[in-house]
Image (cartoon, rainbow, N blue to C red):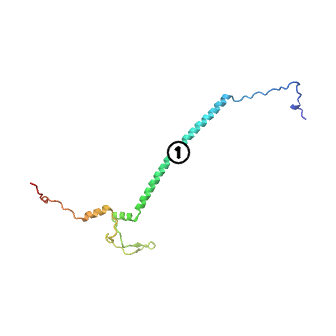
Amino acid sequence: MSALIDERQKPQEPGSGLRPVPAVQPGIGRLPFLLILAGVLVAGLVGLLMLQTRVQEQSFDLRQLQTQATQLSYKQAQLEAEVQQKETPAEIARQATALGMVPNPYGVYIDVRTGSVVGTQKAVHGNEVPNITYKSPEQKAAEAAAAAPAAEAAQPGDSTPQETNQ
């Protein structure tokens, strides 16, 4: 056993059931606790308001970008349709005719492996295949105007006399 006296074995004073209460530990008061609680609440509300504002800004940006993407997809579809229209054989032939090219029924080919020319080259004048024409309406109108006889300029005295009612 130790030299210290066990507290349970201390002799008790007769007649007294009282003992000393430990001193109250100083803690945070009611007012500072409420101020801290109010500060946390205000900080939370401000954070929530900022978060909501940021989400709405991003939502607005998203709508703008989606609208822009839709417009660009329409523009892409329009350009693809335009390219497809310009890739047609008839359009290519019309553009070639506008450049002065004419269809050539005498095909000449180059053998890529040997580099030799297969066939006989012949010059064409544009009337070899009369059934094939790829002319624009403007070209057809210009050819019709050139083929029509030019009207002679009116000379003084060429007019016919008109009858007068007297």
Q: Residue at x 58, y 39 (%)?
A: 48
Q: Position of residue 82 (x, y in %)?
A: 41, 58
Task: Name the residue tied to disc 1.
Answer: 59
Q: Give how far across and how far down residue 71 sits, in percent.
A: 46, 51
Amino acid marked by disc 1: Ser
Q: Residue at x 62, y 33 (%)?
A: 39
Position of residue 45 in the picture relative to residue 120 (left or right): right
Which residue is nearer to you in this view: 166 or 84? Answer: 166
Location of the C terminus (image quadrant): bottom left
Position of residue 2 relative to residue 91, above or below, is above
Q: Residue furthest right?
A: 1
Q: Quadrant of residue 137?
A: bottom left
Question: Quadrant location of residue 149?
Answer: bottom left
Q: Residue at position x 25%, y 64% from top?
A: 146
For the N terminus, the image quarter is top right
Q: Tag 1: Cα neighbours inside 10 Å, few (<14), some, or many (≥20)?
A: few
Task: Tell me: 149 left or right of 13.
Answer: left
Farthest residue toward the left?
166
